[in-house]
Amino acid sequence: MKINKKLIIALLLIVTAGAIGFGLYFQTNTNSDVKEVSYNEFLAAVQGGQVSTVYLVDEAKIKGEFSNGTAFITDNPRTENFKEILLKNHIKVEEHKANSAIMNVLSTFGVILLISALGVYLTKQSSKQTSREFSRMSNFEAIPQGEIKITFSQVAGNEEAKESILDLVDFLRNPEKYGKYGARIPRGVILYGPPGTGKTLLAKALAGEAGVPFYAVSGSDFIQIYAGLGAGRIRSLFKKAREKGKCVIFIDEIDALGKKRDGLNGNDESDRTLNALLTEMSGFNENEGIIVIAATNRLDTLDDALLRPGRFDRQIEVGLPDVKARHQILKVHSQQKPLAQSIDLGKLAHQTVYFSGAELESLLNEAAILAAKQNAQHIDIHHIDKAFYTVIAGEEKKDRSMISNKDREITAYHEAGHALMTKLIAPENKVTKVTIIPSTKGAGGFSMNIPPDRMYRSKKEMIQNIQIALAGRIAEEIIYGEENITTGASNDIEKATEIIASMVKHFGMNKKAGMINYDVLYGGRNAGADTEVVSECRRIMEELYMETKQLLQVHMELLVKITELLLDKETLNEEDLNVLIVDEVKAAV
C-alpha cells in the first residue's frame, strides 16, 4: 500500500493546530462571564471571606471565584507571601503550571512540524523544477530528413570550405564504401571565422545534400545553473541522434561550453558539460553516421581536448568573401528582387570590401525596404547607396536642427582630411563615399575607404592606414588651431593605436623593438605595459602625425575645396573627388 506523504503531513498539521487551540482554550478558561475587579476590591473580598477559590494561571492576572460562584479576574501583585495569605484566609489555591508547560511543548512541536513540512515541500518543489527543466531541455526536435531544402548550389562563395565539406556528404551517403578501405568517418568539423560568413548555412547545406536529419543547438543551451543538467542534456542529445542513425548535429557558438580549462575550477558545471561532450564524441562507433559540426568566431579559445584527432578532426576556416564570392552572393540574394538594369553587381562587389555574406544580404534587403516604402518600380542605385550608409553607420538622422553650422563645418573638414589623405598617399584605394550626414549610431559623418582585395597587409599599407586615420584630427588642427581640436577623432586614434601596437608587438615591423611577439614573451600578460614598447609606439605615432600634417598643409587649397563641396552637397562619391583633384592638378600645371 502506497502512503500519501502529503495526506500524512496535512493530518499532522490539523492535529497540532487542534491541540494548540484546545490548550489555549483550556488556559484562558473561557473568559466570557468573568467579572473584572480591582486589587483593593479583591483584598476586601478576601478579608471578608467572600473568595472561595483562586487560580494562579499566569504571572500577570489572578483568576478565581467568589463564594456565590461568580468568576473574577484581577491584577497579580507578585508578592512572595501571596499564596500564604490566601491559604491563611481559608481560600482554595490552584496552580496550572503543568498546562503552561504542555502549551509550550505543543507550541514548540507545532513550530518544528510546520518548518519541517515547509522544508519537505520546498525540497520537493526544487526537485520537480529541476526535473521539469531537464525534461524541457532534453526535448530535442530534429529537422526531419528531406525537409532541409538548402544545398551547396545555394551557398555562394566559400569554395574551399564547400569542397572540404563535400567529402562528408559522400561519407553520409555511402559509409560502406569508405569502410572497405578502413576509413573512419570524421566525427566532428569545426567551422571558424568572422560572424556572418555562412557557417550555419554550410552546416544546413551538408544535411540538405546528404538528406539526413539535422539537429541545431547553441553552446549556451548547455550552460545551466542546476548541477549536472548541462551534461545530461549532452547525453540526451547524442542518445536521440543515435536513434536517428545518420544525422548532422550542429552546435553554434561552441566556445560557450568548450573554452579552455584553466585547471583551477575543475569541478564546476561548465567542465562537467565539456567532459560529457568529449566522452560522447569519443564513444561513437566506427562509421556510425553521426557528424558533429560546430561553429565559432574564436578558435583560439577552445579546449585542446576538443581539437584533437578523433573528436573535431577537421577545422575549416570560413573567411570573409573575396570580390568574386561577393559578386556571387549578391547574385543569389538579388534573384527575387526587382533590381534596376543600371545596377552593376560587379561594381557593388568591388565597393563592399570586408563585407560578410550576412552584411551583403542586409544591404540588398535594406535597399528593397526603401524601394517598397517609396512604391518604386525597381530597386535603383539611390536605394543601394542609402542602404549602404544604413549598414555601415546606421540610419540617417532626420532631425538635424540641433546641429550647428560650426559643427557641420568641423565635420566637413574632418572627413575631407580623411578623403584627401587617401587620395594623396593610397591612390589604389577607393573612396566610395564621403558624407557629413549624421547617423542614429552617433557618427557625425564618415569617409568610406576601400582598399584592394589582398591576402596580406604590407608595412607600407599599415602606415598609410595610420596616416589616413590621423588626417581628420590634423585637418581640424590646421584650420582651427591646436586648442580647438574636438573629440570627433576618438575612434580614429583608437584605430591608429591598434595598428601601431600590432606592428610593434605582433608583426616584428620595428627595428628597435625587434622581431619579437611581445605577448608570447610576456606569457600572455599585458605587454603594453612595457615602457620600451609604449615609447616606441608613441614615437611612431608622433612621426607619422607630423608627416601627415606637412602633407595636408601643402595641399591646403584642395582640402578647403573638398570641404566646401561637402558642405554644399553633404555627400560626395569617388567621381566628385576625382574631378576636384584633376582640376587641382591642371591648375598647378
Image: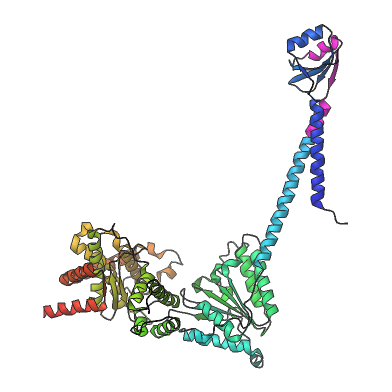
Q: Nearer the viewer, residue 26 or 279?
A: 26
Q: How is the image coloured?
A: rainbow
Q: Nearer the viewer, residue 391 or 206?
A: 391
**Does residue 505 appear in this view?**
no
The residue drawn where x is 70% and y is 61% is 131
**Does residue 47 appear in this view?**
yes
Where 168 falls versus 530 (above or below)? below
In the rendered image, which quarter is residue 338 located in? bottom left
Give the percent coordinates (x, y) of residue 400. 29, 60
Give the percent coordinates (x, y) of residue 143. 62, 77
Q: Residue furthest top?
A: 48
Q: Quadrant of the N terminus?
A: bottom right
In the rendered image, which quarter is residue 350 located in? bottom left
Where 392 falls versus 13 (above or below)? below
Give the percent coordinates (x, y) of residue 565. 20, 70
Q: Provide the major secondary structure of the magenta segment.
A: helix
Left or right of residue 342, residue 294 in this image: right
The residue drawn where x is 58% and y is 64% is 263
Left or right of residue 587, residue 81 in this image: right
Where 123 falls versus 549 (above or below)? above
The residue drawn where x is 82% and y is 53% is 4
Asked if residue 487 lies in the magenta stretch, the reply is: no
Give the percent coordinates (x, y) of residue 116. 75, 46
Q: Nearer the viewer, residue 515 or 563?
A: 563
Q: Quadrant of the C terminus?
A: bottom left
Give the extent of the magenta segment.
80-104
Where 531 falls versus 83 (above or below)? below
Left or right of residue 184, residue 389 in this image: left
Asked if residue 102 lies in the magenta stretch, the reply is: yes
In the rendered image, which quarter is residue 79 located in? top right
